């Protein structure tokens, strides 16, 4: 089954420095039909104006993956971690038993990020932060694990969950397959371009830029680029 979530239908929050679009219920936006996908609880599409951002605040017991679409995001936390993550790269913060952090766009242009929250397998873990470069050329035409707690994804940033966030860039006409099975489900977003998603039963939907789709109750999907495209998938337990 493929459940399309058009960008225009997402929850929204706007102020003078942040334009946020919520794929799932978050903060003041609540839709009981969109309360996450299993342990995947949050997928926010944030545009942050230059020289602004999120002041120091806290999290606990959450795996927070930030995928930078445009610009860069600068991180600092109470553990002494500091870093700048650029477009195409990924950072992971395992909040564990508690972490205080701030995130700012210190660039001269708006920054666009996906912030993805996944519930960890065990509460109270040691908090940590890390970031890694994932050049788009290395994931051209195939899905690459960017952050994962699953076996076989040792090159990915580790998370404390039976889940994986994967990305791919596709030229027009290229396809990638992603297997799921009865015990898995996923959420897919077209970060750029237009793609057609076809499940194992032959049903298809088309996603435009920033659209999302829930993938469940299928053995897998094939994603075909109708134009040059970039996709991100979060694969979690059913």
Image: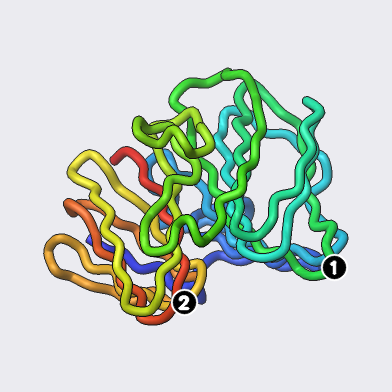
User: Seen in the image, is 65 located left or right of residue 236?
Assistant: right
Residue corresponding to mark 1: 108
The residue lying furthest to the right in this view is 51
Q: Is residue 162 visible?
A: yes
Which of marks 1 and 2 precedes in the sequence? 1
Secondary structure, mark 2, is loop
Q: Would you identify the image quadrant in which residue 14 lies?
A: bottom right
Q: How many marks?
A: 2
Residue corresponding to mark 2: 193
Q: Would you identify the image quadrant in which residue 204 lies?
A: bottom left
Q: Nearer the viewer, residue 205 or 173?
A: 173
Residue lying at 44% horizontally and 33% vertically, measured from the top left:
154
The image position of residue 56, as x and y in percent, is 82, 40
Looking at the rendered image, the quarter that the N terminus falls into is bottom left
Vertical order, 101 against 174 (above or below): above
Residue lying at 65% horizontally and 27% vertically, measured from the top left:
128
Cα separation between marks 2 and 1: 25 Å
The image position of residue 2, as x and y in percent, is 27, 63
The residue lying furthest to the front in this view is 137
The image position of residue 32, as x and y in percent, is 43, 54
Q: Is residue 13 visible?
A: no
Q: How is the image coloured?
A: rainbow
Vertical order, 183 against 125 (above or below): below
For the residue carrying disc 1, how many other residues have a C-alpha within 10 Å: few (<14), some (14-19), or many (20+)? Answer: few
User: Seen in the image, is 103 located left or right of residue 21?
Assistant: right
Secondary structure, mark 1, is loop
Residue lying at 79% horizontally and 66% vertically, measured from the top left:
49
The image position of residue 108, as x and y in percent, is 85, 68
User: Seen in the image, is 218 located left or right of residue 131?
Assistant: left
Residue lying at 24% horizontally and 50% vertically, measured from the top left:
179
């Amino acid at each position: 089954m493929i459940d399309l979530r058009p960008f225009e239908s997402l929850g929204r929050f706007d102020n003078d420095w942040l334009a946020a679009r919520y794929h799932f219920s978050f903060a003041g936006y609540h839709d009981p039909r969109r309360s996450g996908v299993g342990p995947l609880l949050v997928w926010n599409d944030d545009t942050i104006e230059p020289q602004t951002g999120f002041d120091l605040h806290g999290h606990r017991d959450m795996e927070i993956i930030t995928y930078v679409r445009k610009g860069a995001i600068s991180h600092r936390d109470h553990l002494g971690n500091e870093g700048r993550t650029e477009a195409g790269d990924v950072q992971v913060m395992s909040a564990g038993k508690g972490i205080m952090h701030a995130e700012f766009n210190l660039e001269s242009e708006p920054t666009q990020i996906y912030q993805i929250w996944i519930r960890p397998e065990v509460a109270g873990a040691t908090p940590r932060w890390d970031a890694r470069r994932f050049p788009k050329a290395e994931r051209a035409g195939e899905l690459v694990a960017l952050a994962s707690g699953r076996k076989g994804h040792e090159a990915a940033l580790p998370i404390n969950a039976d889940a994986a966030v994967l990305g791919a860039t596709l030229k027009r006409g290229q396809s990638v397959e992603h297997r799921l099975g009865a015990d898995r489900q996923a959420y897919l977003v077209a970060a750029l371009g237009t793609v057609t998603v076809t499940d194992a039963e032959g049903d298809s939907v088309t996603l435009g830029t920033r659209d999302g789709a829930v993938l469940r109750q299928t053995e897998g999907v094939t994603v075909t680029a109708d134009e040059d495209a970039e996709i991100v998938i979060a694969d979690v337990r059913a």
